[in-house]
Amino acid sequence: MSLSSSLAAMSAAFVPRTAYWSVRLSTGTRLSERQLVPTWHEGQRGVRVLDWTLDLVATGDIARVREVSLFCPDGRVATLDITPDMPAFQFKTKSLEMLGAGALEYQVIGRVVDKESGRCECFAWDYRPKPGESHLVAYKTSVFHFGAWRDTVTPLGALSLEVQGLRL
């Protein structure tokens, strides 16, 4: 890990106009993707932002999530209570634009409310809503066939249960 990648992680953690997720664990600890965590890569120390898969799923902390929140750039906060029967997930998409620069399309938090059907409730922060529509969208779909909340969003299909830490 180079100094430049550590600096990129630090700047990503503090971008004020970017939505981000946060969780509260059963221990009361709050974690968010704006937190920096130390890393060791190829003999070099550095930092990176906290990652859902690396820091919640891989450590087993995903089972201790009791609340997931989406902090929005306009100051709103969308929160979902989480239980073992209603596990949490989150993801975001980014599109590639000119000269390789990426632009966020949306950030989603959710919970599965029916494990058999995959039915879920979500909040999405949409960076490119249609004129007159809200950036923050409440949405219901399925983790097995994740649909679109507007006609210009491509349906995602099945979410990766392994990456999300979902055991349905």
Image (cartoon, rainbow, N blue to C red):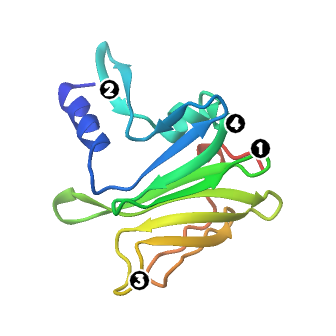
Residue 78, how many percent across, how many down?
A: 52, 59
Which residue is labeled 4 in the image? 63
- Describe the element under mark 3 as helix, strand or loop: loop
Which residue is labeled 3 in the image? 133
Residue 89 versus residue 157 in the image, above or below: above
Name the amino acid type tagged 1. Answer: Pro
Q: Nearer the viewer, residue 2 or 106?
A: 106
Which residue is labeled 2 in the image? 47
Distance (Cα) linking label 3 and label 4: 35 Å
Which residue is labeled 1 in the image? 84
Name the amino acid type tagged 3. Answer: Glu
Judged left or right of residue 75, residue 154 is right
Check if mark 1's residue and mark 4's residue have beta carbons within 8 Å: yes
Q: Which one is earlier in the sequence, the residue at label 4 or at label 2?
A: 2
Distance (Cα) linking label 1 and label 4: 7 Å
Name the amino acid type tagged 4. Answer: Ala
The structure residue drawn at horizontal position 49% and vertical position 44%, both measured from the top left corner, is: 22
Q: Nearer the viewer, mark 2 or mark 1?
A: 1
Distance (Cα) linking label 4 and label 2: 25 Å
Name the amino acid type tagged 2. Answer: Val
